[in-house]
Image (tube, coloured by chain):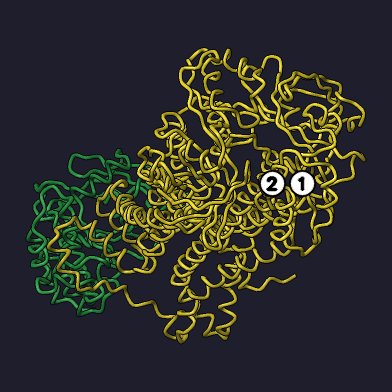
Chain colours: A green, B yellow
Amino acid sequence: MAATAEITFRTKGLTKVYRTGAQDVHALRGVDFQATQGEFIVILGPSGSGKSTFLNIVGGLDTATAGEAWFQDHQLTALGEKGLTQYRRDHVGFVFQFYNLVPSLTARENVALVTEIARRPMQPDEALALVGLSDRRDHFPAQLSGGEQQRVAIARAIAKNPEVLLCDEPTGALDSATGIRVLEALTQVNQAIGATTLVITHNAAIREIADRVVRFADGRIVEETVNATRKAPAEVSW
Amino acid sequence: MVISPLRRKTLRDLRRLWAQVIAIALVLAAGVATLILGTGAYASLDETRARYYETYRFADVFADMTRAPGALIADIRAIDGVLAAEARIVKLGLLDMPGMVEPGTMLFVSLPDGGDGGLNRLHLRQGRLPDPQSLREVVVSEGFAAAHRLRPGTAFAVVMNGQRRDLLVTGIALSPEFIYALGPGEMMPDPRRFGIAWLPGASLAAAYDLEGAFSNVVLKLVPGASADRVIETLDRLTAPYGGVGATPRADQTSHAFLDAELKQLSAMVRVLPPIFLLVAAMLVNMTLSRLITLEREQIGLLKAVGYSARAVAQHYVEFVLAIAALGIAIGFVAGAWLGAGMAQLYAKFFSFPFLVFMRDPQTYAIATIITTAAAVGGALLAVRRVLALPPAVAMSPPAPTDYRSRLAGVWRRLSLPQTAVMTARHLLRWPLRTLSGILGVAMSVAILVASLWSFGSIDHMIDVTFFRGERQDAMVVFAGPEPARALYSARQLPGVLAAEPFRAVSARLSHRNLSRKLSIMGKPATPRLSRVLSPDLAPMAMPEAGLILSEALADALAVRPGDRVTVDFLEGNRRSLSLPVSGVSLGYVGLGAAMEISALNRAMGEGALISGVNLMLDDGAEADFYAAATTTPKTGFVAVMSLTLQRFKETLAENITIMITVYVGLASIIAVGVVYNFARIALSEQGRELASLRVLGFTRAEVSGILFSELAAVVLLAQPLGWLIGYGIALGMVTAFSSDLYRVPFVIGREVYATASLAVIAAALASALAIRGRINGLDLIEVLKTRE
């Protein structure tokens, strides 16, 4: 990625302290981070390293205790509940470990749920086509496999044409072969819509498909690696 | 003491779900409370009345006559089946209270010579009985004394037989004969304008020229004796002396009104508690089903480690029993408290000397058993399904909910917003629960419709009776029949604009084996003041020969226009003849029969006589009229329509506020209980989806909207159903309450449905708002990390 590309995310001294009873838990201890438009970043780290907290704050789901987080020219750390909701609604696509589809809606309807409230959405069918699920669009989540459900979740996340795609353990609940199909879908849409993509994972094998790999430990970024060449998801295995 | 782990879980579940627990317990409590309140108040009043009657020897048969010789009482005592008979003088007089402009009536009742030994004994509240030799001393009824601040020692004036007399109060008393003391021509008791005075027979005989004679007899019958047979003989004995036919206790005014009241109370016991218990059972079932679904894996685990299905079932039943116990406890306290309050309210309205509070342990036991059964029944239905699962299946998470349905294409064509599709599919996925919710809310609407309609119906009754039918301002009833020219002297009274004569004759009307005793009213051919209305509210002209019967009387005698009825006049020459039924009229109070006045006089074989006059008065001249009318010797009593109506409205107004408060409270408990539990369950099932939507950028309002639209659908669908059920209950009540005494017009205006719906919707809204905090507090991060 060229350094001159537009910066999507920027954090400075991002700190999060959870006060739980007697002891304070420092989830983030001053994280400085930057991501440019269209970048595909994999975030690695053990449990409790702060990677999810980080993703939640830049995704507008949580607030920081100190420091700053910026999305383009919006200072996320200055936004209130309403502002954060609007930010998520307009700019962010989320993919979760457990898909979090609405069971009472079909694949297409789950996507339409988001396009109905988005500012510049694509057609639900277009989003489903991007993840290769056109023929399953009238199925309910209960009729879909885990991988298919996760691809519906990706279609739902990208259907609003988000600037940011945030994925928290998107393959965590899937077997290897299915996980690879999901990663393929993610890289495809990353290229197709140019959304800055942050993928949290426990799975180190995934790092090779990223532009850049960020490793969290103990609330800090301890390592950043830029991949000179990205592998296709099909080339990795675990 | 060691608490078993499962029991500890029960306690924690109760604490965790406290709001739902309380909502269900309150519905149960309402069922228990209405059961205890109803049966308790009923039993208290019934027992109070029974003891009052027994202790004070309330008579079984009552008969009036013009003037019977004293010796006749021996013949009456000799009638087979008569245990005791007491000859009395009972006469109406007029009040002459200083500062009281409007006319009032006093009923004079003679005391037995031996003092206090006879029937219908007095309960002296204050003072003493009059000296048998005194011509001045009287005991007065308590309500009247209170309304006029009379105490032993106070004097007041009356007009007896056209003559003004000063009386001295020696005592204040109650009598089982006048528990419901209704003045002549009145619709509600009014102690200010109607009082009872008991005085020595000699004093009364002197005033009414009845020395050595009597005008009223009361009988106590041998237990098991037939009142009808005794009355037959009694009527024969009294007929030569102007007897107008004896009345059994069942038809005695005070007793009959009290009976009607008790009948309404027992109807309440039959209708309300089952509604609450049904709704409570549905709520328990709904809530427990959800709890068990959430704990499915725990149940599997418990069974896997060796707990028997029975032990697991017992655990959930214990949870429900705890809720039932709470509901029963609240219900006991509320029921006892409200029951005492209600009995006191009745005691105030009806004049009882004491109140026997019935705290029948059996009522409480029945309430406990029924309530527990309803709750446990609801619980067992919920537990059964999960207990049937093998542990291994139960321990694995349930298959995702399948929303496939043949309706899928329908939704697509409707092109609804996806959130609406979510709502609709969720409601349709659990049709039984949705129906339970709808039925529950419908019940609260029904309770309101079934209670609020009566007010509109009373308004209708007032409108018909006072503004279309009885349009006169006042009615003067003479002490006895007067020649027709009395009409002209009535016209001369100050303030009278128009006068219309009437004749009232006691008669027995019979058709086949059915008969009723009542007054036939003779009216002018086309009455302008006191009119008879047809069922479609058109004024009816009086037929030349033949009777117009009120609907209630026509029903009671099973006759239709064209049929003939036998009329036995109980006055004058006591003729018997057969008359055709010319028409049927509308009538809400009592039994009515009307005919043209000269036709009535002809049928009686008497000359042109009138019993009284209906009058239209000049506004502003009422006071002069009252003063003149009450001092005219002929006047028996004066009824003033505006005062009757005013009293009627006042009495109702007192009760209406209490009634509405109680019923709206009860309906709200159901509405809140159902809506709150429904919402909590929906939130528990969809919380994860809603949190996901929040993550996707849905605002708090949008997410709340999804849940609220589901509640709204249930609440709105419940409205027409509630109207329908309420209509059914109301119709049942009308049928049950209809008696010879009164029948209630069945009128449910749109405002009844609207009020019922608004009250329930307000309660639903309040409970929905109580859920809002929970929706706003959804944990957006947690939902991403956990599988359901």
How many residues crowd mark 2 within 10 Å: few (<14), some (14–19), many (20+)?
many
Mark 2 = which residue?
Answer: B343
Residue B557 in view, yes or no: yes
- Rendered location of residue A8, percent (x, y): 17, 48
On residue B100, the disc is none
Observer-nearest of B686 and B664: B664
Residue occupying the point 40% across, 48% down: B583
Q: Residue at x 52, y 62 (%)?
A: B512
The numbered mark 1 sits on a residue in which chain? B
Q: Mark 1 and mark 2 in contact (Cβ < 8 Å)?
A: yes
Q: Position of residue B242 (x, y in %)?
A: 69, 42
Marks 2 and 1 on same chain: yes
Q: Amino acid at mark 1?
A: Leu
Q: Quadrant of the N terminus of chain B?
A: bottom right
Of all chains, the one bearing label 2 is B
For the C terminus of chain B, the image quarter is: bottom left
Q: Quadrant of residue B116?
A: top right
- Name above or below for residue B375 compared with residue B714: below
Sort mark 1 into few (<14), some (14-19) or many (20+) by Cα contacts within 10 Å.
some
Marks 2 and 1 sit apart, C-alpha to C-alpha, by 8 Å
Q: Position of residue B763 (x, y in %)?
A: 44, 46
Name the secondary structure under disc 2: helix
Depth check: B148 or B23 in front?
B148
Tell me the number on the disc at residue B355. Answer: 1
